[in-house]
Amino acid sequence: MERLNAWNTYDLPMQDACMEFAKDYMNFLDEGKTERECVDFFVAEAEKNGYMELGRAIAENKQLKAGDCVYSVWMNKSMVLFRIGEKPFEEGINILGAHIDSPRLDVKQNPLYEDGGIAYLDTHYYGGIKKYQYVTLPLAIHGVVVKKTGETIIVNIGEEEDDPVFFISDLLPHLAQDQMKKNAATFIDGEALDLVIGNKPVTIDADTKPVKKGDSAEKAEDKEEKKAGKEGVTKALLRILKDEFGIEEEDFISAELEIVPAGNARDAGFDRSMVLAYGQDDRVCAYPSFRAQMEVTDIARTSCTLLVDKEEIGSVGATGMQSRFFENALAEVMQLCGQYSEIAMRRTLANSAMLSSDVSAAFDPSYAAAFEKKNACLMGGGMVFNKFTGSRGKSGSNDANAEYIGALRKVMDDDEVIYQTAELGKVDLGGGGTIAYILALYGMNVIDSGVPVLSMHAPWEATSKADIYEAFRGYKAFLRKMDFRNA
């Protein structure tokens, strides 16, 4: 089949629109390196666009009608947005669903220790990473610390020019003969991914002279005892944490601190045609989904955008797609529209159509043996539809039916959206999953769709600006025109 390169279809105004959209997207990536930060960004933008918080609408007993917009946030890490359409809910709604968590390192609950004059934070990796990719990079700390009083301290260190950064050390090649004999999965141990955070024992008492070479042990010990009780790098860092952030060591117990690559999203390539950034799986689909939700106002069916947590570890937990927060929010919205009953909600879900907006693996000529090229997605080839995901024999996959795909083809072609179809690598090599199968449990039509990504799950991932823009255009067409129900 013929494959188009989206860039070849753009006139100069389209190229400019594509580049401008990518600029906005990159600004979002810089603001949203964690799921909490993404939610904060989306809430602020939604309220600018006239969206009302669902809890407030319930408290005011607001009667929702066509054109009204509401959103709901769950535990500060997932959210859902609705724009009420003209048609009854029972005829189905159009849903875009993406996840806003990304692979990273998380700080453990008892993390702080010192060894060899170096202070560390102990970490536990989150999601599927190649551990060796995280050593020797400049890293930042993002997250929250919640104190016993309920006070929340927001942490964001390593992104500003004058901020310190952090790192994980690696063994020098001269001493790495044994390390280099191991395979890539094991030569960096998970317990070795500990963050270097300091090296200096701070002298508090200016009148106390520093310990010098040649001092007797007794003299050195006497000087150390006079240093305002400071006995090492760890205690010095605890003083910094307390003075600068109001954080005590025991506050790590109720902290959520994420270690992510430091630095902003960057244009990539001499032609600036690509984006190189952390966290594009799956924020490269979340942002276009959100923008489509904001911009498409002329709808018949209610539009809904889901932005969820925990996909990288199985969509589990209260903020993952397997929880009931979406179902509960939908019930509340239907109630405010005067359309709720248990059977009406079940019919709504079964008659809905969804794009599970998640990334796909772009064909990489450097690793061509991992792909079956004619069924791989290409950078610049437009948004991607994955009929199925799963592993090897489609295990664990949602497999979209032909009737639904036929309807999608018409929607996309009518709006001249450039799209392609793909599988995730060769059949026997592995595979992956998304949130698609979870929504399909309601009986609705679901297909995976998104953006091709190079170096997926690496600290820095690459995407084509044209693919991002076509995803945005495709999501808008879907919200505006899709009207497909189960037979």
Image (spheres, rainbow, N blue to C red):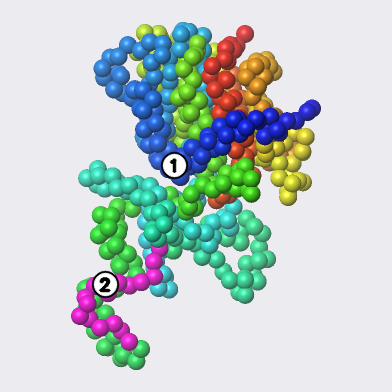
Q: Residue furthest front?
A: 12
Magenta range? 197-212
431 left or right of 355? right
User: Pointer 2: residues within 10 angstroms few (<14), some, or many (20+)?
Assistant: some
- Which of the image's four quarters has the C terminus? top right
- For the point 26% across and 17% down, the residue is 60
- For the point 35% across and 89% down, the residue is 213
* N-terminal-most mark, 1 or 2: 1
- In the rendered image, residue 43, in percent from the top left (x then y), is placed at 37, 31
Toward the viewer: 157 or 395? 157
Which disc number belongs to residue 230? 2
Q: Which residue is mark 1?
A: 32
Report the predominant secondary structure element of the magenta stretch.
loop
Q: Rounded to the nearest whole Å, what is the CA distance between mark 1 and mark 2?
A: 37 Å
Toward the viewer: 222 or 383? 383
332 left or right of 136? left
Q: Is residue 83 above or below residue 269?
A: above
Toward the viewer: 133 or 340? 133
